[in-house]
C-alpha cells in the first residue's frame, strides 16, 4: 500500500497530465456536485426546522390543554 507521499505525488502527476481544460472541467464538476449536496442539506435542514416548529406548537397546545384541565378540576390522576 503506497504511503501518503506516494499518493500525493501520483495525484500531482495526474493533475499535471490532465491539462488546464480537463482540470477546469473537473473543478466545475466538483463545484456542481458540492452545490447540489449543499442544496440537499439546506432543504433537509429546512424541513427539520419546520417539523421542530410543528412539534413545539403541538407541545404548547398539549401543555395549555393540561393547564386548562387542571383549572377546571377535571384532571384525573
Image (cartoon, rainbow, N blue to C red):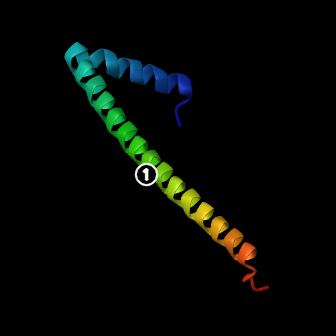
Depicted 32 relative to depicted 58: above or below: above
Q: Identify the image quadrant of the C terminus.
A: bottom right
Which residue in the protein does label 1 denote?
Answer: 47
Depicted 73 relative to depicted 65: above or below: below
Q: Residues within 10 Å of mark 1 (few under 14, many from 20)?
A: few
> Which quadrant of the figure has residue 21?
top left
Depicted 43 relative to depicted 34: above or below: below
> Which quadrant of the figure has residue 29?
top left
Foreground residue among 5 and 50:
50
Give left or right: position of 22 versus 66.
left
Residue sitting at x 22%, y 21%: 22
Residue 62: horizontal and vertical position, in percent?
62, 68
* Direction left: furthest residue: 21
* Direction bottom: furthest residue: 76
Foreground residue among 52 and 24:
52
Residue 48: horizontal and vertical position, in percent?
48, 52
* Direction front: furthest residue: 72
Residue sitting at x 53%, y 37%: 1
Residue 12: horizontal and vertical position, in percent?
40, 18
**How many numbered badges does the structure rendering display?**
1
Residue sitting at x 71%, y 77%: 72
Residue 46: horizontal and vertical position, in percent?
44, 46
Give left or right: position of 62 versus 40.
right
Foreground residue among 6 and 75:
75
Foreground residue among 71 and 26:
71
Give left or right: position of 74 versus 47.
right
Give left or right: position of 24 versus 47.
left
Q: Secondary structure at mark 1?
A: helix
Amino acid at each position: 500500500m503506497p504511503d501518503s507521499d506516494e499518493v500525493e505525488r501520483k495525484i500531482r502527476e495526474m493533475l499535471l497530465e490532465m491539462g488546464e481544460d480537463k482540470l477546469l472541467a473537473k473543478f466545475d464538476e466538483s463545484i456542481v456536485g458540492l452545490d447540489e449536496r449543499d442544496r440537499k442539506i439546506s432543504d433537509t435542514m429546512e424541513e427539520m426546522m419546520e417539523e421542530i416548529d410543528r412539534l413545539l406548537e403541538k407541545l404548547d397546545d398539549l401543555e395549555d390543554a393540561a393547564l386548562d384541565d387542571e383549572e377546571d378540576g377535571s384532571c384525573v390522576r
